[in-house]
Image: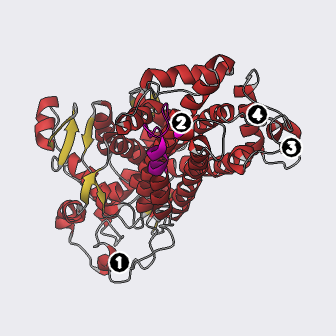
């Protein structure tokens, strides 16, 4: 079970909730903070103080005062009017992460919602009633307003959900579970949608895949080194100590570990003096991507535990401050960084694929073909890898450098962080297909050289890979092989 405190949620815990279906609860201490914050909102309403989002309009309407009798209408109107998302929905995993992260933000006790709001979010999470949230429509500031409005709709019994894997109207799923829709009170609609939980949820799911992909890319690269009789001197510890980057040193160490007992690798001068950069510089290039991933992980874990509502309630309601914690700039920059970091893993992988298939760059059969000329072998696989990395270069253009004013220029700078997170995820899918192609080619190369000469750890990967994709004995429809290998890589754990 994962206990939410608003300050201690980790990526490992998110992973457990999403993939191991750990249940979620709230700490007793935090529930008291939530109740205290709610009492402060109720006092503001009773005293008829003018406070943004409680008894005023929103955005450019912030100066419009709302009569006390319409406070409930204000919150419901907000949710309905802001539920403007379009396009395909986020995956169930991403929407589930949104529920988790929004709950964690609210339990900090700065948002003024009733405990029932958080309890309902956690009930949806634990019972796997997952809001259907369209992916497009967020500017990444003022919170992920459109996506989170679709999430909030579910609490009031509107919108759609995935229930036991089936798409249906929310009210239908509620009837099956005996759940009664909530009537939103003062500030609760705003508290549910003012935040960065859509971009952070998308970024979190993307990061978990990117981290696993980065480890797999090294294991696969190690097999490519064998397939090309690569030189091990470049991975020597002293080379990387001399530069000083920890992630570069760690990558080199993992490559040495994968290949320590290989009979297919060489030393300087044995076959050639130097390897091409795509082999020799694996620690430098992959290590730099790891540096980016470390930064992204730190940013995500801060944002997962952040109060991103507006306004925030402090000092038992004595201070209600309108700030800008909903602005997604930290996540936007991190997601743009992840796009570049993962795209580079695919870029260098594609260059290794070229070295595996190009007869001018190796001593293997042309295009790894069993019958060169009659059979094209892996020729077009390299084309596909090249197309994917080229597409990634377009997707890697930073979203965070763009901004379009909204709400009559009240919200005049936005982050586009949700776009960055979505594009990062697309890049990761493309990159996985590229390294899947590298693995297919590397397996074929080591077969020509002798599988029995492989290192124990790369041979283990070879055996896992061959369960997914058979050897290239003759030309076939390789599209299915690439997709099957790509899917399989999601579940293979690096040694």
Residue 239 has which mark?
3
Q: In the rendered structure, which segment of residues is drawn in magenta?
A: 367-385
Residue 406 has which mark?
1
Residue 145 visible to the viewer? yes
Helix, strand, or loop for circle 3? Answer: helix
In primary-sequence order, the first of circles 2 and 1 is: 2
Residue 368 has which mark?
2
Query: In this orientation, which residue lies closer to the viewer: 53 or 259?
Result: 259
Task: Point out the image quarter for the C terminus.
Answer: top right
In primary-sequence order, the first of circles 3 and 2 is: 3
Residue 10 visible to the viewer? no
Instruction: Look at 31% across and 40% down and name the residue there.
Output: 92
Residue 346 screen position, x and y as percent: 55, 49
Q: Nearer the viewer, mark 2 or mark 1?
A: 2
Residue 253 has which mark?
4
Query: In this orientation, which residue lies closer to the viewer: 71 or 272?
Result: 272
Instruction: Look at 46% across and 76% down and name the residue there.
Output: 413
Check whether the beta carbons of the residues at disc 3 and disc 2 lie within 8 A of each other.
no
């Amino acid at each position: 079970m994962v206990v939410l405190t608003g300050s201690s949620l980790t990526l490992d815990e998110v992973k457990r909730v999403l993939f191991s279906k750990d249940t979620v609860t709230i700490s007793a201490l935090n529930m008291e903070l939530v109740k205290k914050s709610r009492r402060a909102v109720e006092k503001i309403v009773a005293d008829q103080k003018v406070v943004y989002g409680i008894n005023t309009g929103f955005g450019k309407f912030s100066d419009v005062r709302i009569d006390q009798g319409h406070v409930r209408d204000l919150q419901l109107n907000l949710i309905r009017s802001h539920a403007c998302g379009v396009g395909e929905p986020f995956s169930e995993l991403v929407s589930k992460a949104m529920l988790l992260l929004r709950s964690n933000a609210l339990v900090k006790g700065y948002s003024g919602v009733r405990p029932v709001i958080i309890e309902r979010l956690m009930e949806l999470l634990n019972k796997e009633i997952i809001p259907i949230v369209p992916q497009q429509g967020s500017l990444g500031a003022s919170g992920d307003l459109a996506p989170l409005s679709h999430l909030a709709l579910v609490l009031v019994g509107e919108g759609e959900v995935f229930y036991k894997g089936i798409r249906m109207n929310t009210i239908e799923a509620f009837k099956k579970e005996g759940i009664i829709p909530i009537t939103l009170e003062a500030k609760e609609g705003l508290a549910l949608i003012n935040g960065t939980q859509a971009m952070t949820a998308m970024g979190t799911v993307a990061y978990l895949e990117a981290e696993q992909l980065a480890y797999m890319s090294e294991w696969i690269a190690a097999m490519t080194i064998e397939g090309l009789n690569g030189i091990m001197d470049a991975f020597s510890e002293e080379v990387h100590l001399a530069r000083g980057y920890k992630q570069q040193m760690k990558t080199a160490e993992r490559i040495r570990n994968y290949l320590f007992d290989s009979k297919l690798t060489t030393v300087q001068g044995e076959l050639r003096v130097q390897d091409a950069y795509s082999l020799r510089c694996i620690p430098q290039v992959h290590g730099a991507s790891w540096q980016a991933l470390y930064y992204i992980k730190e940013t995500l874990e801060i944002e997962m535990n952040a109060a991103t509502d507006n306004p925030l309630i402090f000092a038992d309601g004595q201070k209600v401050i309108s700030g800008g914690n909903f602005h997604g700039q930290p996540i936007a920059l991190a997601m743009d960084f992840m796009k570049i970091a993962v795209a580079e893993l695919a870029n260098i992988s594609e260059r290794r694929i070229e070295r595996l298939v190009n007869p001018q760059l190796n001593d293997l059969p042309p295009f790894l073909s069993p019958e060169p000329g009659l059979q094209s072998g892996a020729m077009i696989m390299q084309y596909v890898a090249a197309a994917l990395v080229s597409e990634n270069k377009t997707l890697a253009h930073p979203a965070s450098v763009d901004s379009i004013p909204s709400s009559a220029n009240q919200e005049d700078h936005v982050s586009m962080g949700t776009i960055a997170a979505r594009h990062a995820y697309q890049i990761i899918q493309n990159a996985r297909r590229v390294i899947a192609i590298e693995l297919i080619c590397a397996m074929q190369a080591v077969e020509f050289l002798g599988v029995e000469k492989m290192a124990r750890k790369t041979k283990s990967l070879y055996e896992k890979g061959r369960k997914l994709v058979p050897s290239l004995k003759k030309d076939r429809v390789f599209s299915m092989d690439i997709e099957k290998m790509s899917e399989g890589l999601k579940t293979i754990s690096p040694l």
